[in-house]
Amino acid sequence: MKTLPRILYFVAVYSALFIAHKLQAIESSQDVSLAPYLLVTSSPGDTPGDTIPLKNTKVDVSIDGVVAHVTIEQTYANTGNQPIHAEYVFPGSTRSAVHGMTMQTGESIVRAVIREKAAAKKKFEQAKAENKSASLLEQKRPNVFQTSLANILPGDEMKITLEYSESIVPETGTYQWVFPTVVGPRFTHGLTEHENKAEENWSANPHLAQGKSAPASFSLKARLHSGLDLAEVKCPTHPIEIKWNSAHEAAIELKNDASHANRDLIMEWKLAKNKIDSGVLIHQGDKENTFLLQIEPPARVTSDVITSREYVFVVDVSGSMSGFPLNTAYQLMEKLLGSIRESDTFNLILFAGSDRIYQDTPLPANKSNISAAINWMKSSPTGGSTEMLGALQSAMHLPNDESRSRSVILITDGYINFEAEAFELIRNNLHKNNVFCFGIGSSVNRHLIEGIAHCGQGEPFVVTTPSEADGAVKKLTTYISSPVLSHITLTAEGNEIYDVEPSSVRDLFADRPIAVIGKIRNPLQGSIILRGTQANGVIYEKKISLAEISESQRSNPALPVLWARERVRSLGDYNSFAERSRGENVEKNKNIAEIISIGLQYSLLTPYTSFIAINDTPREITGTPKTVRQTLPLPAGVSADAIGGGSSNSIVASNSSVPEPGSVSLLLLMAILFAVQRRR
């Protein structure tokens, strides 16, 4: 007879926990600002037109040499029965310079103008209140943008066309252009309610249930033109059709298919005989002249002059890494550990809601130590939030051998929205560590991946499929074991260069050209000279005569805006954006003031300048417009654990979380347990 009370006791405990969880979800919904997850739910009464206004996305790409010009056409349609305002969060390249936008409603086409962010927002809200069609384009992160649309009436279609340019730097002889298609869910790291509502509410974007494709169609056309013959063109991520117009020009097409819009599109090509199209491009402007320099690195040095190294591997095992990303991370770790020399040392840190360190001190990289570390990693628990900062702090402050060069290697999908804090932490510890970052997944947070590498004087790597792990490991070991130039300087002879970005060139590792952009007084005379010290102490020098530059390389109108984007990148991309949302006085911040000035001068989207387009003819609106946020598919391979689960029929996501039980939940739990105990 004692068995029944025990069964009732455990049933009561389970029921109490279940009810507590549900009550806590209700409590959490009252304050979404602290929620680290997104919970997918349905919204009763919504029609597809009410919740999913994006109809299709068309991308047109023209790549000439090392410069890409991209046009994105987004078509929105209101197929519901009431007016709507729409918001769409979408990704972009971290290096993209967005310099144009138009809005079309019916036959009317309005070209957007660039304004300070606050002024653009104010004009948009005013137009919305005056029943005018309007659109606003804002930058939320260097690789995350938001389009807001006002007053789309039932039956309306609105087209937003965006233009951006970017430069392409090859690695190991391979050129790569990436078009991100979806923003993955972000862990918010306990932002306050004010911060979340003011700046970070884009990260609470709704997502479709796992495995569901976006209902909007997606297509892409590209023209690839090179000054040298093309040896190979491919797209490892998407099925494309390639038509060769000549030996140095190809046309690429991706057909309409919504299933393609859940992972980064990556297009790759190589030039004949493994050459790199190095040299100088010039643009002669009315007021200033801009140059873009890419120089192929010299041959790598032998390994006998490389110092011993220490490696600290920091691996993300949070909920968003469940499935394909984590399995790929495990494979990657096995290959990385197997690639380092026995004379090197290593340690391992796993992180999710907290971090776990394998050993207090680094271990020799022998087979037995590596095998034990891999077994510990695979048997450790996974899942939970993405507390990356604590893990990076632990890695930075581990005791190390001063005679060894330490490299911290982070492996993550990057699904956080507190990137600036991570960048600041890395910058403050550069005297101790080089930092390399592996992004794992089909649509990683490239702003974080590339920013960590940039701030850590390392290189970013992105692994989108398990088959890419071998190549990524080989690239990393090549970079680390073969630094080819240090103490790099760039000067001019018989001329003057200025406003060069980056202002100082980091140490150069093998197989990646040096790429700098800047301004020059006279584009027709003198030389640009690059000097550096090779690892064996030999001085390297490369001189390029400007007088020998061909006519076709002297007119490149994208260069001024590309320079402006790189200048903004150095001023703001990897600095503390968090300060802005915590009440920093913008007028007193010189960096912000310069970014605003650059944005307005070059018609460039920045964190502090936005594009605004308004049709001045008011609309006749019946009823109160409803604001809807465009639902996004989960990135391919990302588990529903990244957003806290959800049914297969879910459409709209609301921000929620799974924190500790709140006061009401605890009281209920205690009451039930007390009653059961008294019953016993």
Image (cartoon, rainbow, N blue to C red):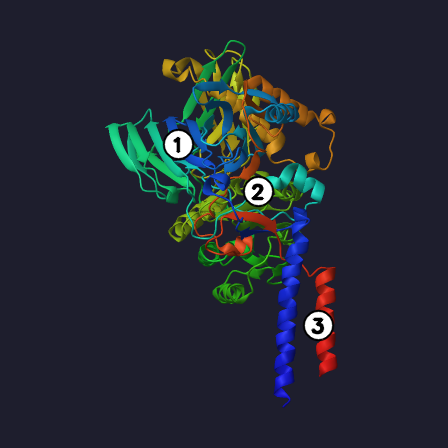
What amino acid type is highlighted by mark number 3?
Ile
What residue would you read off at disc 2? 452
Q: From the image, state whether disc 1 or disc 3 is nearer to you.
A: 3
Contact between labelled residues 2 and 3, with CB atoms less than 8 Å apart: no
The span from disc 1 to disc 3 (Cα, nearest Å) is 57 Å
* Amino acid type indicated by mark 1: Lys
Residue 150 location, quadrant: top right
Secondary element type, mark 3: helix
Viewer can see residue 564:
yes
**Nearer-N-terminus badge (3/2):** 2
Q: Residues within 10 Å of mark 3 (few under 14, many from 20)?
A: some
Look at mark 1 in the image and give the residue it sits on: 58
Q: Which mark is residue 546?
A: none
The residue shown at (40%, 17%) is: 553
**Mark 1 against mark 2, which lies toward the viewer?**
1
Disc 3 marks which residue? Answer: 672
Q: Earlier in the sequence, mark 1 or mark 3?
A: 1
Q: CA distance from mark 1 to mark 2?
A: 31 Å
Asked if the residue under mark 3 is in contact with the one under mark 1, i.e. CB atoms within 8 Å, the reply is no
Q: Residues within 10 Å of mark 2 (few under 14, many from 20)?
A: many
Residue 657 relative to residue 523: left or right = right
Tell me residue 197's x, y (percent). Answer: 66, 40
